[in-house]
Image: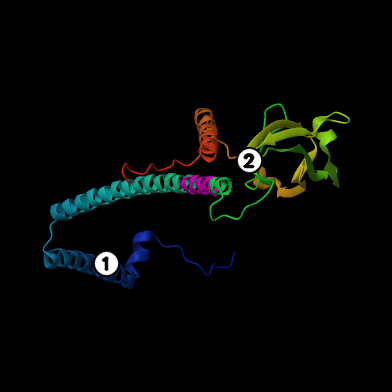
C-alpha cells in the first residue's frame, strides 16, 4: 500500500480562500499607488497655477527664445564677416605702408646721389661705386646696373674699367666666380667707363644653376687708382615692379640724371648791374 504524500493539492479558489492576507496586501498597494499618482498630479497642477503661465504661454516663450537664438546666430555670422574684411583691409594697408617706406628710402638714396654730384656741403670724393643692382631673368642670366660717380675732377673725364666677382657656395664648397667665369669667356674684356660726374653701366652675367651667391665684389680701375667694394647679394637685388611701372620709372630716372648733369655743367647766371650805377 503506497505511503501518503505530504503535499495536498487544492483547487485554486480554495487556496485563495485560505490566504485572505494576500488580498489585503494587494488592496493596500493599490491604494498607495492611487495616492501617489494623485499627489503628483496635484503637485503639477499647483506648480502651473503658482507660475501663472499656461501651456500656450510657455509655447509662445519657447518660440520667442528660438527666434532670438536665430538672430544671435545671424549677428555672429555678420561680425565674423566684418572681422575678415577688417583683416584683409589691414593687410592691404600694411602692404601700402611697406611700399611707401621703400619709395621713401629710394627717394632718400636719390637725394644723396644728387648731393654727391653737386658737391655743396657734402664731402668731395673721387671715383666711387655708388650702387649696384642685379635682377634675375627667365633664362637664368642676371642683368646688373652699376652706377659710378665722382665730384672731384669736374672738368675732366674719369676713365677706366670695371670687373665683377661673385662669391658663393657650390656643391657644399665656397667658390668665387671671376669675371671670365661670369662672362663665360677666357680673357673677357672688362667694361669700360668714361664720364665727368656719373655713369650707369649695364651688363649681363651668367651663374651656374647649382651656385648660391652670397656677395658681389666690384673692382674699378681708373686713372687715379683702384677702388673695390663688396656688397651682400641681398643688397643688390632690385625690387620687383610691375612691367608698366618699370617702363615708366626707368626713363624718368634717366631723364632726371641727364637734367642734373646739365645743371651741373651750366654756368651760374651773372647779374647785370643797372644802368647808371
Give the quadrant of residue 31: bottom left
Query: Under tag 1, what secondary structure?
Result: helix
* Residue 50 located left or right of residue 120: left
Residue matched to label 2: 155
Residue matched to label 1: 33
Residue 205 at x, y percent in the picture: 75, 32
Residue 69 located within the stretch drawn in magenta: no
The answer to whether one can see residue 76 in this image is: yes
Give above or below for 205 relative to 237.
Answer: above
Instruction: Point out the residue furthest to the bottom here.
Output: 21
Where is the N terminus found, in terms of image quarters? bottom right
Which one is earlier in the sequence, the residue at label 1 or at label 2? 1
Give the quadrant of residue 19: bottom left
Query: Under tag 2, what secondary structure?
Result: loop
Instruction: Point out the residue furthest to the right here.
Output: 186
Q: Which residues are magenta?
A: 100-112
Which residue shows up at 58% across the image and 40% down it?
239
Closer to the camera in the image, 183 or 153:
153
The answer to whether one can see residue 141 in this image is: no
Give above or below for 180 relative to 14.
Answer: above
Residue 132 at x, y percent in the picture: 66, 42
Residue 261 at x, y percent in the picture: 55, 37
* Residue 130 located left or right of residue 105: right
- Distance from the alpha carbon under mark 1 to that under mark 2: 124 Å
Give the quadrant of residue 218: top right
Amino acid at each position: 500500500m503506497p505511503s501518503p504524500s505530504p503535499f495536498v493539492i487544492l483547487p485554486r479558489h480554495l487556496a485563495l480562500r485560505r490566504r485572505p492576507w494576500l488580498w489585503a496586501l494587494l488592496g493596500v498597494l493599490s491604494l498607495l499607488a492611487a495616492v501617489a499618482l494623485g499627489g503628483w498630479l496635484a503637485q503639477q497642477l499647483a506648480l502651473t497655477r503658482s507660475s501663472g503661465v499656461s501651456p500656450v504661454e510657455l509655447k509662445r516663450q519657447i518660440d520667442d527664445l528660438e527666434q532670438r537664438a536665430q538672430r544671435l546666430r545671424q549677428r555672429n555670422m555678420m561680425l565674423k564677416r566684418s572681422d575678415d574684411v577688417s583683416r584683409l583691409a589691414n593687410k592691404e594697408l600694411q602692404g601700402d605702408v611697406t611700399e611707401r617706406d621703400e619709395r621713401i628710402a629710394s627717394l632718400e638714396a636719390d637725394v644723396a646721389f644728387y648731393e654727391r654730384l653737386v658737391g655743396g656741403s657734402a664731402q668731395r670724393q673721387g671715383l666711387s661705386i655708388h650702387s649696384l643692382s642685379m635682377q634675375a631673368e627667365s633664362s637664368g642670366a642676371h642683368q646688373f646696373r652699376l652706377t659710378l660717380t665722382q665730384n672731384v675732377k669736374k672738368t675732366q673725364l674719369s676713365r677706366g674699367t670695371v670687373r665683377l666677382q661673385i662669391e658663393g657656395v657650390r656643391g657644399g664648397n665656397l667658390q668665387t666666380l671671376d669675371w671670365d667665369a661670369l662672362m663665360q669667356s677666357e680673357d673677357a674684356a672688362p667694361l669700360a667707363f668714361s664720364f665727368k660726374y656719373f655713369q650707369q653701366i649695364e651688363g649681363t652675367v651668367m651663374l651656374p644653376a647649382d651656385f648660391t651667391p652670397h656677395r658681389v665684389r666690384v673692382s674699378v680701375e681708373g686713372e687715379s687708382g683702384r677702388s673695390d667694394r663688396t656688397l651682400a647679394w641681398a643688397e643688390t637685388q632690385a625690387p620687383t615692379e610691375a612691367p608698366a611701372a618699370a617702363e615708366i620709372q626707368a626713363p624718368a630716372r634717366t631723364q632726371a640724371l641727364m637734367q642734373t648733369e646739365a645743371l651741373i655743367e651750366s654756368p651760374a647766371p651773372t647779374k647785370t648791374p643797372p644802368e647808371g650805377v
